[in-house]
Image (cartoon, rainbow, N blue to C red):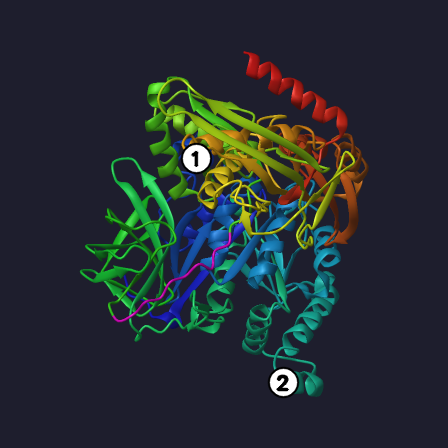
């Protein structure tokens, strides 16, 4: 195929809610460009997208699909993304490496939660947006109502450039207000007949064209001056104004299409080729040092790997974007993240599972390699004189977690290897071996996200696995001051063991003043500080250890052993066996023996004294609290609020955002175990949520008693 320069390449992400028709549109785009002779069908399992077995099993996209089309001397790289928010990692990746976002809308439904989520991502990434209304032949389609929805959500920047003469069964004509022509399609779609706009539609078309011209002119001073003088722009001037407006996100064009019947697809392709910004017209990406990296084909080569696929009979397929320079077959490039040298034996451009070999790719282009020895998703390969690294893809935190185990324990190692491999394909699958919870945890974006992982393990890797609820990482702390002492004495022939430790414990908060005196049970204990250590605990919180030994009753060489004994106690609190935190310990007295005292004796004495003091200091269980944001339609607001409150959630606020309500709450992690499933059920899939760790807070008394009883029962068993 032709080698395209950076000024001839456009990169586009195709997004939309489930059932919007992205896979069908992909087939129509590739068919119209002449790359395939016949369009595939989802029901026939022969489409460019959705070619993985798990996608054919479930009937919709799980992974993003990279493909390209060639149109009028330009190359359009398009990444078709899954619609479900469970697979949002693919959408975020695609938007991060492309320059324009095409959001497909199901004409029979209108804007959905997926539309909202995807638009929110484009806001964060500052990407141009085109809205495309599909399925205009649906009897339920109300195009004007959808445009009104979009304008209500996203403002006057939403500008239709086409509208259907009719929707439903009679849909076959579009009015294009850039061309100011009517496009009439036959039963099989394809090339339309271009006709003058009938009188019955002329007033509406002129009003919409005037609105479009005014919006286009606002993005260029020269065009604005001409608009003020004549109130007209040529087609090329309109395209220039729209391009500039898209780049600055001041125009969101709206197009019409019926992908299944191949109506409007060719005109969409023309717009993508003529108007969408080229890669060199978008803001430069910055490397990890904050330096701008321009898509200059003459610069030294730098290539960023954004996606890994694993295909039968091939193995890993690594997808990359050329950030600068030109990558050529036979190049030797240095992996900036791993230090190894990679030989590029072959380069490909891809359309789903189909790959076409090329000799080189220029800055801004997207391609793939196979069988690289040491490249992972997120790695950068550079020419020897460069040291660029990139980390501009920011994945959302997980919101659904399950413990996983192999039914046959002998398969555990194979399971871990498979999970590691699968995470290369989807970085939003996060695998954690939790020492604290004694579980292998898999974190994802939702129930279906993890169900897909399980399906692949069982059907592709032939591993039987089970999911179980995640144990909750509780914490323990104290609420008052307490004192204890313990003498460890052991004499059984030969050298004995002797150590005696007296200590005081109290709750610790950052900024507390150092203690000088304690009054406990009517007795005064003065503190003479000889040493102080503030230890940030690996599981959060602090241990503050104060040495207040006077008169040499305990030698300084035994203080590390005393500290070690206390730290061991913090790893298993007395109430639930959870980690303890935020404790200040003052060792103020003790005894030692000139012969029998040693580190072990003082470590054991410290453990017993600390455990007794901790139990007498009003111990409490802390539970993890998460900040939760739920994006929910007005109609479901009451149900969602009631459900959160029934699960010990504290409502913090409500805001309207782009036609949805944003509900903010603080919710215990224990109550969020099945929240993704619950929310989907409550709202028929119309809501979404995010969650982020906030803090540890005291559990209610009844919850604490239940946890203590469960721990005691488990210990007895």
Where is residue 52? Give x, y as percent: 39, 36
* Residue corresponding to mark 1: 594
Where is residue 295? Give x, y as percent: 39, 71
Q: Is residue 393 magenta?
A: yes
Name the foreground residue: 211 vs 487.
Answer: 487
Quadrant occupied by the C terminus: top right
Q: Secondary structure at mark 1?
A: loop
Name the foreground residue: 281 vs 691.
Answer: 691
* Residue corresponding to mark 2: 221
Question: Mark 1 or mark 2, which is nearer to you?
Answer: 1
Where is residue 136? Give x, y as percent: 63, 47
Quadrant occupied by the N terminus: bottom left
CA separation, marks 1 and 2? 91 Å
Q: Is residue 695 left or right of residue 53?
A: right
Which residue is most to the top?
Answer: 717
Q: First in sequence: mark 1 or mark 2? A: 2
Name the foreground residue: 135 vs 316.
Answer: 316
Q: Quadrant of residue 537?
A: top right
Name the foreground residue: 419 vs 72.
Answer: 419
| 112 is higher (above) or lower (below) than 447 | below
Q: Is residue 134 magenta?
A: no
Helix, strand or loop for the magenta stretch, by majority: loop
| 627 is higher (above) or lower (below) than 203 | above
Task: Say few, some or many: other residues with alpha carbon within 10 Å of mark 2 (under 14 / 14 to 19 / 20 or more).
Answer: few
Where is residue 170? Give x, y as percent: 65, 45
Q: Quadrant of residue 599?
A: top left
Mark number displayed over residue 96 = none
Q: Could you tell me if residue 690 is visible in this image? A: yes
Q: Is residue 522 left or right of residue 140?
A: right
Q: Could you tell me if residue 452 is visible in this image? A: no
Q: Which residues are magenta?
A: 385-394
At horizontal 66% and vertical 74% (from top left) the residue drawn is: 213
């Amino acid at each position: 195929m032709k080698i395209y320069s950076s000024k001839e390449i456009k990169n586009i992400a195709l997004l939309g809610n489930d059932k919007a028709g992205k896979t069908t549109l992909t087939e129509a785009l590739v068919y119209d460009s002449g790359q395939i002779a016949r369009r595939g069908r989802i029901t026939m399992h022969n489409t460019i997208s959705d070619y993985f077995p798990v996608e054919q099993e479930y009937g919709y996209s799980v992974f993003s699909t990279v493909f390209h089309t060639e149109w009028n001397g330009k190359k359009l790289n398009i990444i078709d993304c899954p619609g479900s928010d469970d697979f949002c990692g693919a959408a975020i990746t695609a938007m991060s490496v492309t320059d324009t976002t095409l959001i497909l809308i199901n004409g029979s439904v209108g804007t959905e939660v997926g539309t909202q989520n995807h638009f929110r991502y484009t806001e964060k990434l500052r990407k141009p947006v085109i809205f495309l209304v599909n399925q205009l032949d649906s009897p339920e389609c109300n195009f004007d109502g959808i445009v009104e929805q979009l304008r209500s959500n996203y403002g006057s920047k939403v500008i239709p450039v086409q509208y259907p003469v009719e929707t439903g069964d009679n849909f076959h004509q579009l009015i294009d207000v850039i061309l100011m022509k009517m496009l009439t399609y036959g039963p099989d779609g394809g090339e339309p007949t271009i006709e003058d706009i009938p009188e019955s539609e002329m007033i509406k078309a002129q009003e919409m064209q005037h609105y479009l011209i005014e919006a286009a002119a606002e993005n260029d001073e020269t065009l604005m001056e001409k608009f003020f003088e004549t109130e007209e722009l040529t087609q090329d001037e309109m395209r220039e104004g729209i391009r500039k407006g898209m780049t600055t996100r001041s125009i969101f064009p709206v197009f019409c299409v019926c992908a299944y019947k191949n109506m409007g697809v060719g005109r969409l392709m023309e717009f993508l080729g003529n108007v969408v910004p080229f890669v060199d017209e978008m803001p430069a990406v910055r490397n990890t040092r904050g330096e701008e990296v321009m898509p200059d084909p003459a610069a030294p080569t730098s290539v960023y790997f954004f996606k890994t696929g694993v295909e039968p009979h091939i193995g890993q397929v690594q997808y990359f974007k050329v950030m600068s320079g030109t990558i050529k077959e036979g190049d030797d490039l240095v992996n900036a993240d791993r230090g190894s040298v990679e030989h590029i034996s072959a380069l490909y451009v891809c359309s789903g599972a189909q790959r076409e070999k090329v000799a080189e790719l220029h800055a801004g282009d997207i391609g793939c390699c196979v069988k690289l020895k040491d490249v992972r998703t997120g790695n950068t390969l550079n020419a020897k004189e460069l040291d660029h690294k990139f980390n501009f893809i920011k994945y959302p935190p997980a919101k659904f977690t399950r413990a996983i185990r192999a039914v046959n324990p002998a398969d555990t190692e194979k399971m871990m290897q498979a999970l590691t491999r699968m995470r290369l394909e989807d970085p939003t699958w996060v695998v954690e071996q939790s020492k604290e919870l004694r579980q292998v945890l898999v974190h994802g974006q939702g129930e279906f996200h993890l169900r897909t992982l399980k399906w692949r393990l069982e059907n592709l890797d032939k591993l039987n696995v089970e999911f179980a609820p995640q144990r909750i990482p509780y914490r323990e702390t104290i609420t008052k001051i307490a004192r204890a002492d313990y003498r460890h004495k052991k004499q059984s022939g030969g050298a004995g063991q002797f150590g005696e430790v007296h200590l005081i414990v109290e709750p610790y908060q950052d900024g507390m003043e150092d203690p000088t005196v304690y009054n406990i049970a009517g007795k005064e204990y003065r503190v003479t500080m000889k040493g102080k250590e503030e230890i940030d605990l690996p599981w959060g919180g602090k241990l503050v250890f104060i040495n207040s030994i006077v008169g040499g009753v305990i030698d300084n060489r035994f203080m590390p052993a005393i500290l070690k004994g206390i730290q061991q106690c913090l790893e298993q609190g007395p109430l639930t066996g959870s980690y303890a935190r935020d404790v200040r310990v003052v060792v103020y007295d003790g005894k030692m023996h000139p012969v029998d005292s040693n580190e072990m004796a003082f470590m054991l004495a410290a453990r017993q004294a600390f455990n007794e003091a901790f139990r007498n200091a009003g111990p409490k269980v802390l539970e993890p609290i998460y900040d939760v944001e739920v994006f929910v339609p007005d109609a479901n607001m009451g149900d969602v609020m009631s459900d959160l409150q029934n699960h010990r959630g504290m409502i913090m606020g409500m805001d309207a955002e782009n036609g949805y309500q944003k509900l903010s709450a603080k919710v215990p992690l224990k109550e969020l175990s099945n929240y993704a499933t619950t929310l989907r059920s409550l709202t028929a899939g119309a809501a979404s949520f995010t969650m982020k760790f906030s803090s540890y807070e005291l559990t209610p008394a009844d919850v604490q008693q239940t946890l203590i009883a469960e721990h005691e029962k488990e210990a007895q068993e």
